[in-house]
Image: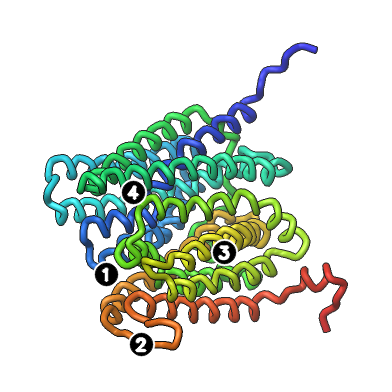
Amino acid sequence: MPHRPPSERRKGIIVCTWEGIFANPYIVITDTPYLTAFAVILAASNPVIAFIGGISFLVRVFQLLGAYLVEHYGNRKRFCALMAIGARLTWVLVVITGIFWHGDAGKILLVFTGVVLVAKIFETMLGMGWMSWATDLIPNQLRGKYFGFRLSLMAMMNVVTTYAIGYMLDLFKSFGNEADGYLVMLVIASTCGFITIILFQKQYEPPFYPASDRDFQRDVWLPLNDAHFRPVIIFNLLWAMSQGIALVFFTVQMISVLKMSFTQLALFNIIVTIGRVALNPFWGKFTQRFGSSTTIKICGALITLNPILWLFATPDNLLPVWLDAINSAVALTGFDLASMNIQFTDSKPKGRAYYFAWVGISSGIGFFVSGLIGGQLADVFQSVSFQTPLNTIVGNHWIFLISFVLRIVSLVVFWKLRPDTPVLKSLGLKLN
């Protein structure tokens, strides 16, 4: 049988896989935990740390602009390459500032904050173009299997990158300047980002045919007017607020209070990543049988317990932190999988990009606003203590307690908005 050359689509899928592998170090290094860690290293205040940690979520409002440009620009390959240049090469400015104003932490922090804002705006719009591109590139019957494979490869890269980051930062810390370690990391991130831009140019783009009757002012409001999809948006807003109020302060607690090394921070993230890879097949089958809503409720209940664990963590007792990592590895996998599945299944084909955008916007607003509130509350509660029979609640503990309560409220609202019809049917039960 004669050899059949690979099709353009098949070659494009291979390039997409390599792009994911090189994108992962960039994503890890420029993710919220390490942005927060660098802000702590630069002696930023709690409100500034909260603002930097919230930028990734604030800029999700640009998903609407990204969706609009994708629908009207047409050439997703060129669009993604341009957005990637703005997102993944801008970090070099922080490195240059660190070289020329090495001893001026305030100036580095100012440039760093500005770069985070600009880079995340471009990254957000890049995501809209990439999702549209990937949806057409990967055939529907292969999409689940392929993305499971791609995510597994990226998870392995995540483990390697995360350990290397922790080791490198601890090495520079032993020399008395972990800030230089982070600048080196940003060079690595930009290098990997540059490689992804080249790979975008080599990736096949299927023909793109935007709807002929598209109307931005009409289509942008479709998700909010969709009674079936609206609960998804409401829950994402509430859940993000419950998470965002304490998000950056878990990292702050690790570094400033629990005195954990960067290698230990890396180990925490590695546990979560490995758990995601190992449990992804289980949660995939569970969601298939019982429904995405049921999976979100079960996993959300487990995630809700995490803030309570941190009340009992001390520099001499890090067991609660490791229990959080294990619990997150179990629960976040199912939660994220079910959340993504609901977006795909409940959104309408017409204007789908706007459905994705509104989910991102609702969670982004929730994370950012609650993060700013958390930054202010962290200062208010810093010296407030309350003795219980088991421990002393002080400082960031109050933020963790507030997050715990808000998570419960979010799940109760979601339970009311999304009845468990699939799980009742699978168990042979009927609704009254």
Please report the residue visible at 59 percent of the width from the left and 53 percent of the height from the top. Answer: 276
Q: Mark 4 — residue?
A: 119
Residue at image point 64% right, 56% down: 344
**Which quadrant of the structure image shows residue 377?**
bottom left
Residue closest to the eye, 73 or 78: 78
Cα gap from disc 1 to disc 3, whole angstroms: 29 Å
Q: Which of marks 2 and 3 is nearer the N terminus?
A: 3
Of the 4 image quadrants, the one containing the C terminus is: bottom right
Q: Do the residues labelled 4 and 2 touch (CB within 8 Å)?
A: no
| Residue type, label 3 | Asn
Instruction: Say which label, 4 or 2, has the lower sequence index.
Output: 4
Which badge, 1 or 3, comes first in the chain's sequence?
A: 1
The N terminus lies in quadrant: top right
Residue 155 versus residue 257 in the image, above or below:
above
User: Residue 47 bears which disc, if any?
Assistant: 1
Label 1: few (<14), some (14–19) or many (≥20) C-alpha neighbours in 10 Å: some
Q: Name the residue under label 2.
A: 386
* Residues packed near mark 2 inside 10 Å, few (<14), some (14 to 19) or many (20 plus): few
Residue 67: x and y, percent? 49, 52
Q: Give the foreground label among 1 and 3.
A: 3
Query: Residue 358 location, x and y as percent?
Result: 51, 63
Occupied quadrant, residue 312? bottom left
Foreground tag (1 vs 4): 1
Please tell me whether mark 1 sits on a helix, a strand or a loop: helix
Could you tell me how far apart the alpha carbons at marks 2 and 3 are, in whole angstroms?
A: 27 Å
Query: Residue 336, how many percent across, how many down?
Result: 58, 59
**Element type at marker 2?**
strand
Q: Position of residue 141 (x, y in %)?
A: 73, 43
Whether 240 is drawn above or below 349: the answer is below
**CB-based contact (under 8 Å), mark 2 and mark 1:** no
Q: Residue at x 77, y 70 (%)?
A: 423
- Return the residue at label 3: 327
